[in-house]
Image (cartoon, grey):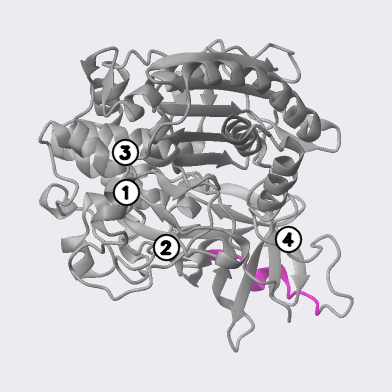
Amino acid sequence: MRLPPYRTRLLATGAVALAGLVLGACTEDLPQVLDDDTIAASGNESASLTLEQVEASTGTLDDIVEQVMTATGVPGVAVAVVYEGEVVYEHGYGVRNTTTGSRVTPQTVFQIASMSKPISSTIMAGMAGQGVFDWDDPIAEYAPQFRLSDSWVSEHVTFADLFSHRSGIPGGSAGNDLEAVGHDRSTILERMAMVPLDPFRITYSYSNYGMTMAGESAAIAAGGTWEQESQDVLFGPAGMTSTSVRHQDFVDRSNRADLHVRTDDGWSPDFERQPDAQAPAGGVSSNVSDLARWMEIQLSGGSLDGERIIDEDTLDETHTPQILKSPPHPAIGDPAGFYGLGWNIGTDSTGAIRWDHSGAFSTGASTTVKLLPSEGLGIVVLTNGEPIGAPEAITDSYLSALQTGDANTAENIELWTERFGGIYGEPVEDWANPPTDAAPARDDAAYLGTYTNDYVGAVSIVAGADGLEILLGPDAEAFAMRHWDGDVFSYIDAPELPDFAAAIEFTVDDQGVADAVTISSFDGAGQGTLRRI
């Protein structure tokens, strides 16, 4: 019997950075991972750039983008650069759709995946500045219906805990697995109460549904919906007219970039991604023109065109390190990495503070934003290709050219290609070719039936036209099962990743009939075993 190892992959999380642990003890008080002087220094670096230098540097972007697009083949790219309250560069490259050949412009709307997180933290900062809640308030004060598996954590988890990924909700699959089979936001948040937690406030664990829970709680505190609060607090006041957290708004845009994945025939717009369930974490769509305005708000302390959009103090909290994400590696020169509230916080090779965040959908989106607050400089790059490191290579090459005079584009392409090479984990064994000594399966009747647990809900094994099928989710979506070895089968749970199958293992009773099934897709949340009804 060979049950292939469970692979942890990022189902539409957009999470690119590696996780780290805070080295310290858990207390009720929030951990202070940097001292006050270090935190204060993040906003007090001396600016060294001039407008002339920045304007001249944008001339290198065409070459950088062309080199990255040639090396990766990514179909479409849009870029914007802001400096000291001004948009100094906006441009679109390539195509919105490889079939139609429609061109990308600065107004082309992209799905930005987890780059939604710092935008959502801006919305949250705006609501906090209006007195709707405080970052350090427990969400139970406003939304007691949202529970976690530990009652003490449920009573004490704060908006800041959830937006900094230190709540203990395990990252990767928890909630994402339910979304992948069609469950809605309310159902997923309700079932988060069944997910075992990691240690509270000392574990960095990237959680889409922790952040979504915080966003929903904030909307409840405001007496509205996340979708309407996003519009009222940020998009409307900032004039971000092409930005939305509703997927239908994206679909309705005539100038939108379709998602693309790599196939044997090149890049193809074969898939769609509907992220409404996790809107605060990954549901924003926008263009670089709107995002340039948003970057200006970040770099100016909450103002835009001389008007206050977001409260400065509550916005500053989003840029303050909240938890250690990755420890320093002095041997290779990597500094420590931190997570703020919806932002990665760290220093680059020149010692400058950076705020950044990337986004990725396996179905064909990859994005990033990087800001140098001491310089008043920001760059955003959106692409409509699956995550292979293209936007990160562009931003790092541009910033390197600006700060050191050398873009190092080839090196950055190689570096980011390598980093993204393992984003989905390691493929399991060749499902098309079972082991040579595989044991035969039992008669189909041994497996047919319905299995359930409180997290996954009901799952049915049925006889399809071409063999056994597993029916998942509220719409009972059918997935073909392939026999592997004995009572172990597999199925392709993400069509855009055919090399990454999920495992299905039946437990059979003394009568030769399965009384339970374990599905690896749900085991990342500790909820993969279901009992026969």
Residue 285: % across, % down: 47, 26
Whether pointer 4 and pointer 2 mark residues with C-beta atoms closer than 8 Å, the reply is no
Quarter of the rendering occupied by the N terminus: bottom right
The first of marks 2 and 3 along the sequence is 3
Label 1 sits on a secondary structure element that is helix
Name the front one of labels 1 and 2. Answer: 1
User: How many neighbours does mark 3 have within 10 angstroms: few (below 14), some (14-19), or many (20 or more)?
Assistant: many
Q: Residue at x 39, y 44 (%)?
A: 343
Residue 473: % across, % down: 49, 50
Q: Is residue 188 left or right of residue 177?
A: left
**Magenta region:** 439-450
User: Gap between marks 1 and 2, in whole Å?
Assistant: 14 Å
Residue 459 vertical placement versus 476 (above, below): below
User: Residue at label 4?
Assistant: 427
User: Residue at label 3?
Assistant: 121
Instruction: Decide which of 358, 41 is in the foreground and name it.
Output: 41
User: How many neighbours does mark 2 have within 10 angstroms: few (below 14), some (14-19), or many (20 or more)?
Assistant: many
Q: Amino acid at mark 2?
A: Pro
Instruction: Decide which of 107, 216 is in the foreground and name it.
Output: 107
Q: Is residue 289 left or right of residue 217?
A: right
User: Gap between marks 4 and 2, in whole Å?
Assistant: 22 Å
Whether pointer 1 and pointer 2 mark residues with C-beta atoms closer than 8 Å, the reply is no
